[in-house]
Amino acid sequence: MNYTLLSLSAIILAGLVDWLIGDPRWLPHPVRLLGRLINLLERIARRYFSSPAGLKLAGLIIVLIAAGGSGLLAYGLITYAHRLHPAAGFMSEFYICFTVLAGGDLRNHILRVRDALEKKELEKARAATAMLVSRDTDDLQEAGLSRATLESLFENSADGLVAPLFFLALGGPVAAVAYKAVNTLDSMVGYKNSVYLDLGHFSARLDDILNFLPARLTAFLILLAGLPEGNINSALRILRADYRKHDSPNSAWPEAAAAGALGLKFGGADYYGGEIIERPVINAKGREAVSSDLGRGLKLYYRTSMLAFAMLILLAWWIRSWEVLIF
């Protein structure tokens, strides 16, 4: 059987199923198990290490166990399944590809916020937004909730959809699983605060490296997806001016592209744990977001997702075609 066709079919089917159903809570998900493993490893690390150097070493060991172990486990599962039967191999690849993609789940989260705001149910909108962002949402009004949701949508479009597709194209399910493990580590221990600065050092740095190309690719795709909005020159100007305006070297790329495409202002003052944090403003001349902008943002996200899927499937096909020719 043609393995290239089988592999591409698994990615395509996974993308379609992810887009249709997102991440149902009733379906077992390896990322939840990975989260428990990371929590366990953190408790063990803090029991035996306390100095900054020791915590950095422990953080490196956690990365090797979580990311390396996840990749090896995926490789073993796929290899064993293919030896059993091509159908078993296909299903194992499909399931792993499905679990690393979060495009449909991200859309579903945004829809919950949009629907709650449209019904003027602020408490429900705040609760839904809190599932997306780390800032305090208890006192946010329509504008703050809309901005927070859109910022999360486009920041996470890079590491939740484009980056997993990128690594699926480059190295298949094993590479994508290793990436997902690093990204999960960064979301759990990669904070730049006194608690995680040392333990999460390697997780945060590695996540920055792995997302370097996907974040920039996402910004480019958002610009293309924004063509129907008719303001690509403005969006490109905002991207050039504001792509550095974030603590992360990657996050401002998709945010700036989307802010320019939608004509909105992102960033500014937000509360985190009761403390106000001033973040750089992206597209300072843009207007404040309102609830109706969530629909516009979703349309831009849909077009970006379709472009990403088409481009990266073509990349996957091209890479696998060369592998067949070489080997």
Image (cartoon, helix red, strand yellow):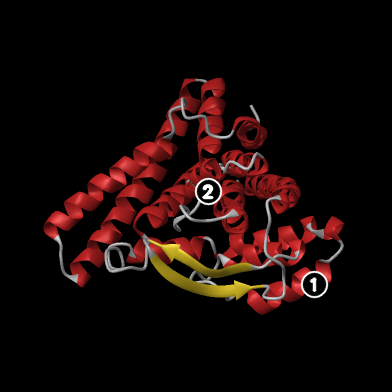
In the rendered image, which quarter is residue 267 located in? Answer: bottom right
Q: Position of residue 275 (x, y in %)?
A: 38, 67
Label 2 is placed on what type of residue? Thr
Left or right of 37? Residue 296 is: right
* First-in-chain label (1 vs 2): 2
Residue at image mark 2? 129
Residue 29 versus residue 249 in the image, above or below: above
Q: Secondary structure at mark 1?
A: helix
Percent from the top left, x then y, of residue 310?
74, 46
Q: Residue at x 79, y 58 (%)?
A: 226
What's the residue type where badge 1 is placed?
Answer: Ser
- In front: label 1 or label 2: 2
Residue 32 % position (x, y): 39, 38
| Crowd class of label 1 (few under 14; some 14 to 19; many from 20; radius 10 Å) | some
Can residue 299 be seen? yes
Residue 243 visible in the displayed image: no
In front of the other: 265 or 84: 265
What is the secondary structure assignment of the residue under circle 2? helix
Q: Which residue matches tag 1?
A: 234
